[in-house]
Amino acid sequence: MAKENNSAMDVDNQNSESVDQINSPRFSINVLQLLKSAQMQHGLRFGDYARYRRYCTARLRRLYKSLKFTHGRGKYSKRAITASMVTEVRYLHVVLYTAERAWSHAMEKKTLPDGPNARQRGYLIGRLRKAVKWATLFQDLCSIKGDSRTSLEAEAYAAYMRGNLLFEQDQNWEVALKSFKGARAVYEELGKYGDLENQVLCRERVEELEPSIRYCLHKIGESNLQTSELLRIGEMEGPALDLFRAKLEAVMSEARSQQAASMTEFHWLGHRFPISNAKTRVSILKAQELEKDIHGPKADSLPADKRLATFDKIFAAYNEARSCIRNDLASAGNSESMKDDLSGLDKAIGAVLGQRTIERNQLLVSIAISKLNKVRDDKNEKVTKPEELVRLYDLLLQNAADLSDLVSSGRDRKPEELAFAEECELKSLVFRAERCFYLAKSYSLAGKRTEAYALYCKVRFLADTALKELQNSKTADQAVIKELQTLQKESRSNSCIEHAIAIMEEEQAPEKLSQKISTISLTGKDKKLEKFLMDNLDVYESAVDASVKSMSRIERFPPSFQAAARSPIVLDLAYNLIECPSLENRTKKDKKSFLGRLWR
């Protein structure tokens, strides 16, 4: 009988708890929008995971204090959050930000400059496990205490965290794929409803999940992704793609290390330099792979900003190779043959760097020329001036001179080096002609017709000289020849225009001068009558022109000139002809004694 009573009491308690859960209020959290705004405002706009982790810690501290959900004084006492404790939405925020703090700490270790070492990688995976644990708890609590949308978003968030953990562990690719696909399905459905901002955020998250899904399919073997496609996917932006980019970089560096094992020599202008350092080989191989993007068949289709970013990566790779070579030089000891090989390799890498620098500056010149010739539609768009092109051509001339000096250094030069030095001289001649052309344009815009005419004539001379040299050269570039012919025609037409404008200005100069003199007024009154408030204080009349949106005119400033009477000039001409009377009788005479008169 007692057992029956106890079982009846248990059933009543369970029923009462279920009734309380049903009757309890349902909380609503827009999880994706909340996290996206917090991430963008606190560091993840620039990939600063340390700052975002500090924000999550500070946010949790404020939540603990406001909820009075502290963990003891002095000694830490663990307090778990259960469904019965969630009486406010802030308890759900505690669980969510704890998961975010663990995830951001893991990503901070993942995005270290040199990558995480073995110990840091173990810590990283531990933090990702912690993030999965708190995300799962958040999913369970939202399924009980949240509305249907919040529950779905929490489910997608937990699936995304599980996928990140398996993605980093390089195992269970099928489970990781299932997690990422589950998160994508939820965000695709949520993107069909709600306000416009929420729909955009859901679509962005779907796009960020797509590369991870494709990579999982590639690892399973269900997708035939090429390396170039993976690299193109890795160029996408977003905090959700940082883990994918780090994984892709690790895979690519491993592939480069395997490929660099077969690279033993560096070929340059008929020379062969041995490469013994593995880091040097990997850096050179990375730079050569990037060069395919700017010299390949698809190079013209790339936008200018992507090409500039590729040039920056090439410079970084070659500079890293040069630093490794110089470290080897410092530790080479007394081995002369090794020092000669390393010095030659350093010279070759420096020459390749100089070539890429010239190509990058030529790309900047083409961008500036397109902006100079383009009709400006937007008022806030920056205008390119000819002076900027002159500065760029100065850089190109300096680059060409440095490259020529570098190649010309050394005693035993091969025919390839001599031909390369001649090519550098030809480039310098072409750059001088183009620099002179834009310098003439800047003088023309400044109204200096004589200087502009002389410079255009100089451009014609330089272009003629460069054309003759290029036509005699066996390796002449036809595109450069066409550019010089166009430059020659433009300089000829512009010199004629400058000459004609100078003659017209000289003819019109006296007329303009007389016109300006005729408009000079001492009173400062213009032909256009302006109303000022101080002139009509006795008349109620507006001092603001209704047809023009301008400030009210109270008084003229600076004040206009007024004619003022001068003081008379007194010339005292009679002073020199006046005879003044003697005043000796009025002067005081000295009285002397008797002895004084005797000695007089």
Image: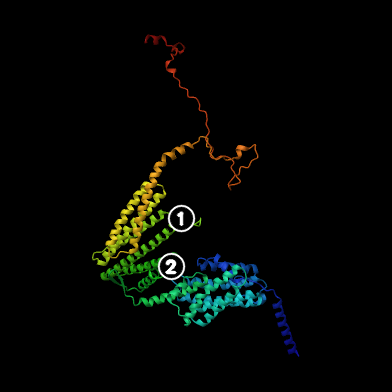
Q: Quadrant of the N terminus?
A: bottom right
Give the camera-side residue of 303 and 283: 303
Where's residue 383, x and y in %? 46, 55
> Residue 8: which quarter of the image?
bottom right
Image point (52%, 30%), residue name: 564
Q: Is residue 535 left or right of residue 468?
A: right
Image point (38%, 66%), residue name: 315
The disc at residue 383 is 1
Where's residue 584, x and y in %? 44, 12
Q: Quadrant of the C terminus?
A: top left
Where's residue 478, x and y in %? 33, 64
The disc at residue 297 is none
Q: Residues within 10 Å of mark 2 (few under 14, many from 20)?
A: few
Q: Is residue 193 left or right of residue 600?
A: right
Give the camera-side residue of 313 and 14: 313
Where's residue 347, x and y in %? 31, 66
Q: What residue type is disc 2 on?
A: Leu
Instruction: List the single residue furthest toward the left.
Output: 412
Q: What residue type is disc 1 on?
A: Val
